[in-house]
Image (spheres, rainbow, N blue to C red):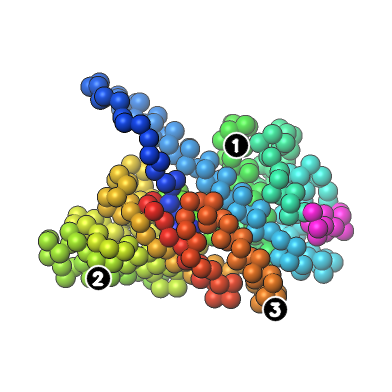
């Protein structure tokens, strides 16, 4: 999905760099796996990708919450129901269930609140009783990230944090029961680092089409084998550039690259990604637009807060094995490079 550029520009960077190692063992012939075994393998791969996406999102959302981003909560005396619902859910996960607004407000505006989010070991700490309460809250029609976004943008990372934890636990520690609406069906959090395997989002009606440069339709077969500085972009969303020459012969770029605000996916469909160095699975530079920080209006007035957030973006980029190039809180443009997808 470059959450830095790695398949997603939601592509939320490159997978881990290939490490050198021992020579491969001799290849022994063996019968191909039965169809049932292949299906199980594909299901296992999809589950692994979903769990990794949940963990990435949990970490990203927790790191996006700062004292500055929650300043507006201090001034709320009569919260909208959905605002109170989100904070009650967060308090439940932190083992401090609360329904009184004054206490919820005190909880999230405390200086140590962001650190509590980042340090929560939810896999160990959340009990079955807490999970039942979490599942019930996440299933409420009003607990919708798109709705929350229209009421309080700074609370979106907290809402997505809760959902990602719920989805992960429902697939691991507490299996069974009603399904929790997955991340792909929820509203977007601040853009996480790129994840090549993540499920591609549905195309939005009327969204700008992908622009491919140079125009591959004007090239012959020989020219398609060595397209120089291939660039794939979507206006207002982002851009991926593949420096040097790329063999584009036979590539369906419209299928191999998906771009939405905050998310760029390269090889979004399982089983289509070629070995490193082939196709689009190679070094690239990703530029993402509309990657604004929470509470960006207040941050515009605070250069120090801008610099802190930029350092946070740099750290998250590097943790995803991508190379940070630049980030601008004011323009919302984030740029990084990856070794491969």
Image depth: mark 3 or mark 1 in front: 3
Per the image, label 2 sits on a secondary structure element best described as: loop
Q: Position of residue 295 (x, y in %)?
A: 68, 69
Kindly report the secondary structure that dominates the magenta region of the rendered protein: helix
Circle 2/circle 1 CB separation < 8 Å: no
Which residue bears the numbered disc 2?
Answer: 214
Q: Position of residue 283 (x, y in %)?
A: 35, 56
* 51 relative position to 154: left or right: left
Quadrant hosting residue 80: bottom right
Please say whether residue 107 is one of the residues in the magenta stretch: yes
Q: Earlier in the sequence, mark 3 or mark 1?
A: 1
Per the image, label 1 sits on a secondary structure element best described as: helix
Which residue bears the numbered disc 1?
Answer: 170
**With respect to residue 130, does 321 lie above or below?**
below
Specify few, some or many for label 3: CA neighbours under 10 Å numbering under 14, 14-19, or 20 or more.
few
Which residue bears the numbered disc 3?
Answer: 301
**Which residue does the image show at 82% across and 44% down from the upper left?**
96
**Which residue does the image show at 85% across and 57% down from the upper left?**
106
Please say whether residue 187 is one of the residues in the magenta stretch: no
**54 or 310: nearer the viewer:** 310
User: In the rendered structure, which segment of residues is drawn in magenta?
Assistant: 100-112
Q: Earlier in the sequence, mark 2 or mark 1?
A: 1
**With respect to residue 166, does 321 lie above or below?**
below
Q: Earlier in the sequence, mark 3 or mark 2?
A: 2
Q: Label 2 vs label 1: CA separation? A: 45 Å
């Amino acid at each position: 999905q470059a959450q830095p550029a790695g398949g997603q520009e939601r592509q939320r960077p490159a997978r881990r760099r290939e490490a050198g190692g021992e020579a491969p063992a001799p290849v022994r012939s063996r019968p191909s796996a039965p169809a049932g075994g292949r299906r199980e393998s594909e299901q296992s791969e999809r589950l692994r990708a979903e769990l990794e996406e949940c963990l990435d999102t949990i970490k990203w959302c927790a790191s996006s919450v700062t004292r500055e981003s929650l300043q507006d909560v201090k001034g709320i005396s009569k919260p909208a129901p959905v605002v109170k619902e989100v904070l009650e859910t967060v308090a439940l996960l932190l083992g401090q269930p609360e329904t009184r607004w004054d206490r919820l407000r005190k909880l999230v505006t405390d200086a140590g609140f962001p650190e509590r989010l980042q340090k929560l070991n939810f896999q160990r700490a959340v009990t079955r009783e807490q999970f039942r309460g979490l599942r019930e809250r996440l299933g409420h029609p009003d607990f919708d990230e798109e709705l929350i976004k229209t009421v309080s943008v700074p609370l979106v990372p907290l809402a997505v944090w809760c959902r990602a934890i719920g989805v992960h636990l429902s697939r691991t520690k507490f299996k069974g029961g009603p399904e929790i609406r997955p991340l792909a069906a929820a509203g977007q959090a601040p853009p996480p680092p790129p994840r090549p395997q993540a499920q591609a989002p549905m195309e939005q009606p009327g969204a700008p089409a992908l622009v491919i440069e140079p125009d591959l339709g004007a090239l012959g077969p020989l020219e398609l084998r060595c397209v120089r500085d291939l660039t794939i972009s979507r206006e207002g969303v982002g851009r991926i550039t593949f420096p040097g020459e790329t063999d584009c012969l036979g590539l369906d770029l419209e299928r191999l690259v998906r771009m939405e605000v905050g998310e760029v996916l390269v090889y979004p469909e399982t089983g289509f990604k070629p070995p490193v160095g082939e196709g689009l699975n190679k070094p690239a530079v990703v530029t993402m637009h509309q990657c604004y920080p929470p509470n960006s209006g207040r941050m515009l007035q605070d250069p120090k807060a801008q610099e802190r957030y930029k350092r946070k973006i740099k750290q998250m980029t590097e943790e995803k094995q991508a190379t940070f190039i630049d980030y601008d809180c004011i323009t919302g443009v984030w740029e990084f490079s990856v070794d491969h997808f």
